Image: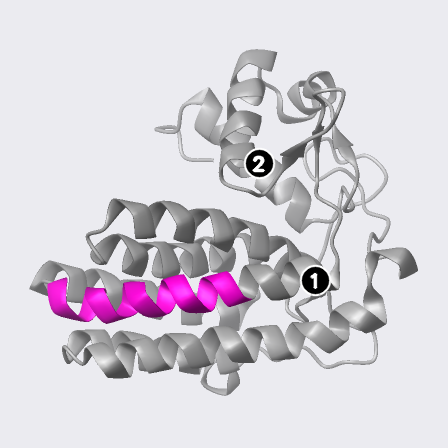
Amino acid sequence: MNSKFSAEEMAYYKIIDLLLSKNYAPGDRLVETELAEMIGVSRTPIRNALRKLIAEGLLVTGKNKGCYIPHLNAKDMKEVFDARIFLEGKAAFEAAYHRTQKDIENLSRIIEEEKEYYRTGDVANYTEANKNLHLTISALARNAYIDKFVRQTFWRSELYIFYFDRFYAPDLSEIILRDPHKSKSCIEHEKIVKAIIEQDPSGAEIAMKAHLKSTYEYLSPRFLLHGPSKGVQPEHKNIYTGKEGDASF
């Protein structure tokens, strides 16, 4: 973890790592004391990180004020992706108007990083690059309300991606693709960025909507086949303490 990160930032990203590694399943409660011991920080940064994750929609609070991974269901998945298609389509449209030369360079850098992380199977950094791309485009819309709600719907939908995308939860019978030129997501991201760079608002909106629609259409049958009721939490060691086996992807 980069030394420039504060304890709260470290806690934030390592909690996300725990979700990625399937140390927790939908419906599980996250306990501050356990997380603090696992990550090696005090309870205060853990508490603040959990509050941020709740505000972003990745986690929820229960009746007893505990912090939980939301239960996942088909209706919620459709609604969150419908919202993302609407919001991020508009964000991409506006981003094509407002992008600067610096923005072009930044988006191009993120695309190249994403392809490299995909090629090497670096899940944590690939996730970060994917987040950076979508949220950078959202910020380029220059609309605080669009940006706020894109962030919330993005993080909520990530739960479905974490648990049901083949890159994060491959079937034993499947061969994991590692060529970014054959990755549907990488190809679609490049189309979105190309339209933004070329200042083609309609093209950027169409490309973004098509990308999110294809993501939903891919995940939906996998959710029905491998839903939480059928078990999505493989046995892993804790990725920080090293107990009971290392997490892998």
Other-residue count near label 2 (Cα within 10 Å), few / some / many at <14 / 14–19 / ≥20: many
Residue that protrudes farthest toward the bottom in the picture: 182
- The image quadrant that residue 15 belongs to is top right
Look at the numbered disc 2 and give the secondary structure of its residue. Answer: helix
Give the CA separation, mark 2 to mark 1.
29 Å
Q: Which residue: 58% across, 43% down?
A: 58
Q: Is residue 193 magenta?
A: no
Q: Position of residue 17 (x, y in %)?
A: 61, 43
The 10 Å Cα crowd at callout 1, few under 14, some 14 to 19, many 20 or more, is few
Tally of marks = 2
User: Can I make out residue 99 in this image?
Assistant: no
Query: Pointer 1: what residue?
Result: 75
User: Does the magenta-highlighted stretch encompass residue 90?
Assistant: yes
Magenta highlight range: 82-99
State the predominant SS element of the stretch in magenta. helix
Left or right, residue 145 beside residue 122: left
- Is residue 225 rendered to the left or right of residue 164? right
For image coordinates 64% across by 35% down, the residue present is: 60
Residue 57's place in the image compared with 215, above or below, is above
Above or below, 225 against 249 in this view is below
Q: Relative to the observer, which residue lies in front, 186 or 199?
A: 199
| In the image: residue 156, left or right of residue 203 | right
Place of residue 202 in the rendered image (x, y in percent of width and height, measured from the top left): 24, 81
Which kind of residue does numbered mark 1 sit on?
Answer: Lys
Q: Which mark is residue 14?
A: 2
Q: Extreme right residue here?
A: 230
Q: Tell me the amino acid under the disc marked 2.
A: Lys
Q: Position of residue 109 (x, y in %)?
A: 27, 64
Q: Which mark is residue 22?
A: none
